[in-house]
Amino acid sequence: MARISRFTIMTLRKKIISKFFNYRMNNINSDSDFINCSVDVSELNGIRSMHIGSETIQSSMNIADPFFLELNYTKVMSLCFIFNKLPKEILVVGLGGGSIAKFFYKHSRESVINIVELNSQVINVAKTYFKIPQSKRFNIIEGDAIRYLFDYEMEYDILLSDAFDDIGIPEKFCTMEYFSLCKSRLSQHGVFMINLWGSDPKTTIYIDRIKSVFDGRVLYAAADNPGNIIIFAFNALPSELRIASLKLRIKDLEKQFNFNLMVYFNRLIESSPNSNARRIKFE
């Protein structure tokens, strides 16, 4: 396990000069490189952020309200609650600062949240600086997420893939085999989500792969322009697809979560060209 002395905490998020150790630029995609990247923490105007091997923000937390979703891409992820109101089992691939996992913990009181994280340093930093809950409902597993999915045949109502290293999404989390494995671990009406990067030229290829695996039952919404794109893939048709009913649910969630969701919902609808003013329709 990494020692806390290996972490850097800064009071201003300007140019971060990371102290890399055992970091090999020529072999950046291997798991060992990710494990050995420096994990840094910055603070600015009451917001604490995690950085893994670069200046890029991996996760942010409002210090005064640790369970609030500070970054827009995590707000998009919360749309899963309009399709699955009462998830029991949730799996998150990739911990970061734990923002979305903590959000699930707060707003889905009956859920058990399991998070699989490869990098022990990320786990230590999250526990030290990002207000990780101490609860039997909130479990962090150190290890390889794909191996975990193979080894433990659990069914999940929500399976969120948010695995990023210092340069983007590792390719192994964007293959047909990975998407098929995730689908096989969903409950009957389970929802698979994945966080993709809009500027990646392969993003459309990844979306097409997900559509193929999930028989076209896929919606997606951009958090910003450019920025993250959150994909929602459904193991079966959601029980509610009437837009008016879903918008009523969103209004309730906006009051509960204290942030705007309708703009992201409208982007979801736009991602399905067969939808009309009354109902979401898939390809």
Image: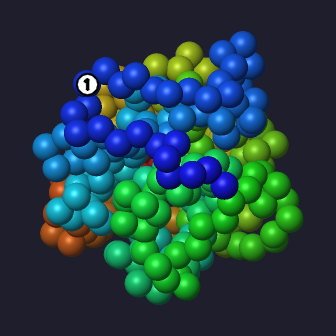
The colouring scheme, among rainbow, by chain, secondary structure or one colour, is rainbow
Tell me the quarter of the picture where residue 79 sits: bottom left
x, y (%) of residue 14? 25, 25
Residue flagged by tag 1: what amino acid is it?
Lys
Left or right: where 206 falls relative to 264: right
Which of the image's four quarters has the N terminus? bottom right
For the C terminus, give its image quadrant. top right
Residue at 68% over, 28% down: 22
Q: Is residue 61 left or right of residue 52?
A: left
Q: Is residue 166 left or right of residue 108?
A: right
Left of 95 or right of it: where is 259?
Answer: left
Task: Report whether residue 80 is seen.
Answer: no
Provide the residue designation for mark 1. Answer: 14
Q: Residue furthest front?
A: 5
Residue at 36%, 66% in the rendered image: 131
- Report the residue that reaches farthest toward the top: 26
Residue 7 locus on image (x, y percent): 47, 43
Quarter of the figure with residue 206: top right
Task: Give the secondary structure at mark 1.
Answer: loop
Image point 22% across, 58% down: which residue? Answer: 63
Q: Is residue 98 above or below residue 214?
A: below
Question: Residue 141: which quarter of the image?
Answer: bottom right
Residue 159 position (above or below residue 178): below
State the image coordinates of residue 97 (x, y, percent, origin top left). Answer: 43, 53
Q: Position of residue 163 (x, y in %)?
A: 59, 44
